[in-house]
Image (tube, rainbow, N blue to C red):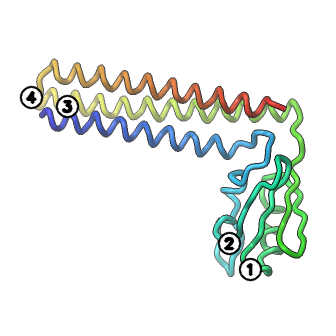
Amino acid sequence: MDEEIQFYLDDVQESMGKALAHLNVEMSRIRAGKASPAMLDGLRVDYYGTATPVGQIANVSAPDARSLLIKPWEKNMVVEIVKAIRNSDLGLAPVADADGVRLNIPAMTEERRRDLVKQAKQESESGKVRVRAIRKDVNEALRKLLKDGASEDAVKSAEDKVQKVTDVSIAEVDKILSKKESEIMTI
């Protein structure tokens, strides 16, 4: 039984780590005033009939804080990249040249910054919900082990450890949100 309890304790660490990693990815997609190649992670380009992530057909870089440069490996993909950007919900105007596509990132208004902070708060709340769901699932599994004959002290100790990991993960979610909020609100 002790091995099973340890398995669940290891699993909760790994699962909550994955939840935090997912939150970091979602937060990186929220524009924070400066250009970031991660802004285009969800952009799909028609590559010979297949919707392909732009990062797989081009090099995306941020030469400065206000622009992105997309250099496709095949010159004929410039037109497809421009079309994909115009059809996306990014709200950016692509400028095509011989080498690739340049995106000028406009400065954000105060209202847009507040909207992005709201979006970041929603993402962080989703992260907390994921962490709590993991805790609930592991605690239910531990209670099942108790019914199957595990010692009550071992299960109680394991539940306490799960709660400590949960508290640390929730604090990390709050730290990620705080960092993103300050990024967004910095002009």
Mark 1–mark 3 Cα distance, whole angstroms, equals 57 Å
Identify residue type, mark 3.
Answer: Lys
Which residue is pictured at 25% across the width and 25% down the height? 158
Residue 64, given in percent of the width and then of the height, sits at 83, 51
Crowdedness of circle 1 by 10 Å Cα count: few (<14), some, many (20+)? Answer: few
Labels 2 and 1 touching (C-beta < 8 A): yes
Q: Which badge, 4 or 3, is on the more N-terminal residue?
A: 3
Identify residue type, mark 1.
Answer: Glu
**Residue at which label 1 appears:** 74
Q: Which badge, 4 or 1, is on the more N-terminal residue?
A: 1
Q: Which badge, 4 or 2, is on the more N-terminal residue?
A: 2
Which residue is pictured at 71% across the width and 66% down the height? 59
Labels 4 and 1 touching (C-beta < 8 A): no
**Residue at which label 2 appears:** 57
Q: Which badge, 2 or 1, is on the more N-terminal residue?
A: 2
Labels 4 and 2 touching (C-beta < 8 A): no
Nearer the observer: mark 4 or 2; the answer is 2
**Residue at which label 3 appears:** 144
Look at the image and tell me in which quarter the C terminus lies.
top right
Secondary structure at badge 4 equals: loop
Mark 4–mark 3 Cα distance, whole angstroms, equals 9 Å
**Residue at which label 4 appears:** 149
Q: Which badge, 1 or 3, is on the more N-terminal residue?
A: 1
Mark 2–mark 1 Cα distance, whole angstroms, equals 8 Å
